[in-house]
Amino acid sequence: MMEDMNRGFSEAVQRAGNGANGAAFHQASFMSYRNDGQGPPKVFQASTATKAGPGGVRETRKSLRDSERELEKMSIGHHIHDRGHEVEKHRNTRSGRTEELQNYHNLDEKDAEAFDQEWRNKTRTAFKGLEDVERRGGNLREIRDRRYEDEYPSDRDRRQSDRRERGGEKQLALPAPRAPIGNDARSPTGSEARGSEHWGRSQGRERS
């Protein structure tokens, strides 16, 4: 599922790079819900959002929530061609313990500050073509809002779930991506179990 979503974005990035002012925005999300009546419902949520511009610049945001593993992940990555700096946070939903990782791709840690400045300088113009997407009501404004960085998906989803239970609603809704997910994310097995529902969405926008 997520592989198909990411494949569509890769094609959009390639098309965006063909023009001097090309830019692309893509987001995808997936949700699996299972309730067999033998315990708490099992919920798996994953989302990814990426902006790409000319010159090989990209911003990736991923998030993952797996109630069965009692795990939440979120990350933001800045990339220029094959170089990248990614900040990743993990949280155990039972203990509340958090962990932060700094990942470097073809980059030394001592060069990270200079790389971040280079990325900021390049994206001032590289992402300019995506401004119209935001003005037309696209979800780009959510991707740019960094206030989410201290808010984990479960805090937001729990409030929505409580409202739906009180209202007797059965529809599941996955919020727009707030951050990127790890590459090892997998949907839970046993989707054929009673009470299971799957829902996903993918959308991409290009500006050239």
Image (spheres, rainbow, N blue to C red):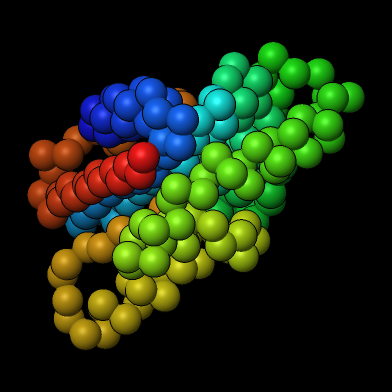
Res 132 quadrant in image: bottom left
Report x, y in % for residue 45.
36, 48
Q: How many marks are shown on the rendered structure?
A: 0
Q: Is residue 17 visible?
A: yes
Foreground pick, 163 / 135: 135
Which residue is farthest front? Answer: 20
In-image side of 139 versus 195 (left or right): right
Foreground pick, 125 / 163: 125
Q: Is residue 71 visible?
A: no
Residue found at x 38% / y 23%: 18
In-image side of 110 versus 159 (left or right): right
Residue found at x 33% / y 26%: 15
197 versus 151 height, above or below: above
Report x, y in % for residue 109.
83, 24
Residue found at x 59% / y 17%: 82
Foreground pick, 188 / 139: 139
Report x, y in % for residue 101.
71, 35
In-image side of 76 versus 54 (left or right): right
158 versus 7 height, above or below: below
Res 83 quadrant in image: top right
Q: Quadrant of the C terminus?
A: top left
87 versus 11 height, above or below: below
Which residue is farthest right? Answer: 110
Q: Quadrant of the N terminus?
A: top left
Residue found at x 17% / y 39%: 191
Report x, y in % for residue 205.
30, 45
